[in-house]
Amino acid sequence: MSALGATMGLILAIILIIKKVSPVYSMILGAVVGSLAGGVSLGDTVGNMISGVRDIVPAIVRILSAGVLFGVLITTGAAESISRGIVRGLGHRNTLMAIALAAMLLTATGVFIDVAVITVAPIALMAGRKAGINRLKLLLAMVGGGKCGNIISPNPNTIIAAENFGAPLPSVMYVNIIPAIVGLMLTVWVVARLVPSGEEETAPMDNPMEEAALPPLALSIIAPLVSVILLVLRPLCGITVDPLIALPVGGLVGIVAMGRWRQVGASMTFGLQKMSVVAVLLVGTGTIAGVIKASTLKDVILGLMERGGVGNTALAPISGALMSAATASTTAGATVASASFAEAILAAGISAVWGAAMVNSGATALDHLPHGSFFHATGGAVEMTIRQRLKLIPYETAVGVILAILTVACYYVIG
């Protein structure tokens, strides 16, 4: 299949997504049109699309099981308890760091980044008002912290990247810890300071949040802590506990420890609903990934990189960034990039763990563009207009690029 055909299909999918057509159907239609335009028969087109979906089915099953942990953290109030505890513990003098750290840790424990921002936003607005910090800075801290947490989390983007590279999930999470921590500090101490401090952007004073019956912080962290302990048994003790088991077990242990076991049914239903949306998205993403994988697009990109003097190592983060820009989604970007370019990245001599880690970091670079839901969900969390939200894109991009560069740097230093 010609690279031109695959590119046409990808562009068509982007246009349809921008036009508010369902991303799933946009990518399926883009896959069909791109494959046919690339000179492939209808029968082979369908075969390539199904092959692409088949490759990510194991990851989809793991993502669905992760819904147990996700549902427990959100429905029991554990996620909110964690974020409140962090902001309260660091105090108003370190408001931006507290907010960024809260978003990072929530995302790192398995909460979707947009949900993490929505969870932290009410606390951030109140703290920002007291500290005199405007909404742009507050949202950057939350988004930046969320991006840092996303590259070390058992979230769908990390799971799918690890699966497509055949790498252990805990290892892919582990090697990005240094980039995540350094990226968090650079987000707060460097990038946030570049954001304009306009008086008109001052966060509005919300009504004080009602004190819900939240679980204590010490009990709230049990669910993600158990999941992480089970996952790290492989590198520490040689005992492999698949995420398919580790994540739901952590959620179930946590809900029992919090004394909320009566909510287990509601938590699992909530988590399944949220993860089902991602699973369906991945089906559509798999179709276009299968078409791109069967095309010569990756060869064309490799050729352009060689002519530009860019090493093959850069293919991992660049492919993640390009695909996240196309889909405006970390998960979809990591899926398409890892499914389409894993073979070429591995052939360049990069290990599966580092290849997955660099694709994952690269996918955070442009996942916040306006044709994706993340852009609108996070803007709405702090009551921003679209015009105001657009102002933050350069700074969000800077954070994502920093994370990608840090992961590549770590690969060269310790990989």
Image (cartoon, rainbow, N blue to C red):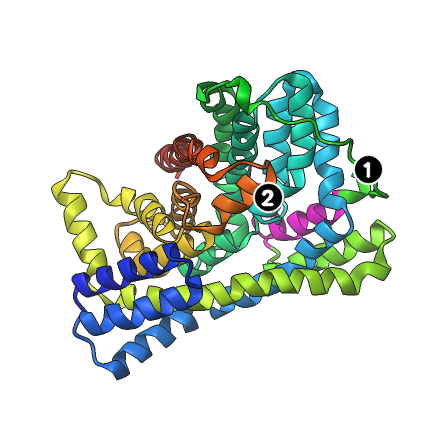
Percent position of residue 36, x then y:
22, 74
Q: Residue furthest bottom?
A: 43
Between discs 1 and 2, the one toward the N terminus: 2
Q: Which residues are magenta?
A: 221-238
Of 343 and 80, the residue lying toward us: 80
Looking at the image, do the residues carrying marks 1 and 2 touch, with CB atoms under 8 Å apart? no
Percent position of residue 344, x then y:
27, 56
Of 8 and 20, the residue lying toward us: 20
User: Within 10 Å of the Cα at label 2, are there few (<14), some (14-19), or many (20+) other Cα atoms?
Assistant: many
Report the residue at 53% width, 40% height from top. Answer: 379
Report the residue at 37% width, 58% height from top. Answer: 336
Q: Does 81 appear in magenta?
A: no
Pick the quarter of the image with the N terminus. bottom left
Pick the quarter of the image with the C terminus. top left
Percent position of residue 183, x then y:
48, 30
Q: Is residue 290 something one can see in this rendering?
A: no
Q: Secondary structure at mark 1?
A: loop
Report the residue at 52% width, 44% height from top. Answer: 150
Q: Secondary structure at mark 2?
A: helix
Give amino acid for label 2: Thr
Percent position of residue 403, x then y:
43, 35
Query: With 231 as the anchor, is 348 left or right in this view?
Result: left
Q: Is residue 209 above or below residue 91?
A: below
Measure how far apart labels 1 and 2 are at the Cα level: 24 Å
Query: With 105 as the anchor, is 17 left or right in this view?
Result: left
- The part of the image, by quadrant, that contains residue 51 is bottom left
Of 200 and 68, the residue lying toward us: 200
Q: Which residue is mark 2?
A: 107
Numbered label attached to residue 210? 1
